[in-house]
Image: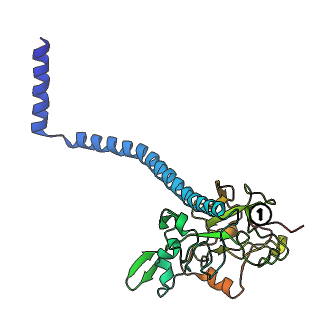
């Protein structure tokens, strides 16, 4: 009896396949697929964003690990951090100038002749945040720029200890042993600089101009939904969310912020809580 029932069912299935589905049945199937997709796509998107966020945190972590290994090899002396010099942690100037070869030249990121951290870096990709989609147009083609990160100007400054630009009387740190205030877990090292502001490898925070006169010399990026990743001198990485609207300077893909800074026109940010946070984690007054 069971065998007969199975055979009857099989016959019905075969008949259905031969006859095809009705329009109503096809619409029901499509509706079910659409419902399943609407349930799965947000989950898949969250997974994709989580994977991207992990990658974006890993890049500054790799740079900081290289920085720590350099200091270990040089008896606690940190890698130089200075603009326009072969004696610096990384070489190359970022811009949107189609005649500037540095913009696409990854050799200046890892070649020891240009980059003091080059021997410690596994890949030139570690200098580029995956969320930074900035490109430069050369001829009729677009090419990704090779660097997103800059280093705290107070760390690795090679001038006199109390002559930090825009921060007269504030500490600069050339040795790990000098990092007492703020300590290594509070002293930021590298971060993503705004794509229109990044040029050399130095990120300058004006610690002297406070309250109503607060301003950005270098402007931070906000690739991560209004936040930026910061690595610290102890090796850990934090995602810091900006709280003031004027910190979220729109991306114009023109290099205008770097140009304005080069002629002394900086981004005003009076009473900015974000500037206060940067100041507290960049340096401190000498005692």
Find residue 68 and report its image quarter. bottom right
Quadrant housing the C terminus:
bottom right
Q: Is residue 224 above or below residue 110?
A: above
Q: In the shown orientation, is residue 97 left or right of residue 210? A: left
Q: Is residue 129 visible?
A: no
Q: Which residue is most to the top?
A: 1
Secondary element at tag 1: helix
Left or right for 31, reference 9: right
Q: Is residue 148 visible from the viewing direction of this image?
A: yes
Residue 206 spot, x, y in % from top left:
77, 74
Name which quarter of the figure residue 58 lies in: bottom right
Task: From the viewer's side, name the closer residue of 56 and 247.
Answer: 56
Crowding at label 1, few (<14), some or many (≥20) Cα neighbours within 10 Å?
Answer: some
Residue sitting at 60 percent across and 82 percent down?
Answer: 256
Query: Residue at left 53%, top 77%?
Result: 113
Task: Give 283 or 145, whichever is nearer the viewer.
Answer: 283
Image location of residue 59, percent across then percent down: 54, 60
**Residue 177, relative to residue 20: is it above or below?**
below
Q: What residue does disc 1 label?
A: 273
Question: Can you give x and y, in whole percent of width and height, for residue 35 in the image?
Answer: 38, 43
The N terminus: image quadrant: top left
Outermost residue on the right side: it is 287
Horizontal and vertical percent position of residue 232: 68, 58
Residue 149 lies, with reference to residue 22, above or below; the image says: below
Vertical position of residue 38 compared to residue 269: above or below: above
Q: Residue at x 68, y 61 (%)?
A: 242
Number of numbered discs present? 1
Coloring basis for residues: rainbow
């Amino acid at each position: 009896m069971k065998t007969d029932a199975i055979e009857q069912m099989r016959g019905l299935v075969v008949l259905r396949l031969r006859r095809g589905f009705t329009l109503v049945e096809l619409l029901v199937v499509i509706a079910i697929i659409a419902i399943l997709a609407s349930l799965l796509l947000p989950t898949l998107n969250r997974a994709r964003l989580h994977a991207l966020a992990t990658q974006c945190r890993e890049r500054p972590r790799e740079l900081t690990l290289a920085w720590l290994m350099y200091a270990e090899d040089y008896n606690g002396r940190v890698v130089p951090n200075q603009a326009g010099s072969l004696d610096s942690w990384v070489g190359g100037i970022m811009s949107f100038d189609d005649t500037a070869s540095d913009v696409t030249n990854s050799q200046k990121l890892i070649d020891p002749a240009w980059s003091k951290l080059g021997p410690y870096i596994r890949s030139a990709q570690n200098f580029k945040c995956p969320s930074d989609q900035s490109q430069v147009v050369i001829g009729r083609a677009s090419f990704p720029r090779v660097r997103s990160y800059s280093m705290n100007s107070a760390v690795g400054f090679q001038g006199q200890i109390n002559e930090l630009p825009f921060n007269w009387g504030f500490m600069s740190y050339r040795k790990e042993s000098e990092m007492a205030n703020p300590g290594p877990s509070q002293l930021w090292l590298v971060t993503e600089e705004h794509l229109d502001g990044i040029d050399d490898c130095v990120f300058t925070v004006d610690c002297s101009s406070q309250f109503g006169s607060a301003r950005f010399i270098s402007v931070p990026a906000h690739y991560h939904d209004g936040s930026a990743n910061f690595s610290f001198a102890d090796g850990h990485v934090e995602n810091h969310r900006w709280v003031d609207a004027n910190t979220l300077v729109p991306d114009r893909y023109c290099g205008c912020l770097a140009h304005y800074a080069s002629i002394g026109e900086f981004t005003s940010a009076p009473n900015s809580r974000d500037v206060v946070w940067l100041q507290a984690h960049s340096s401190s007054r000498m005692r």
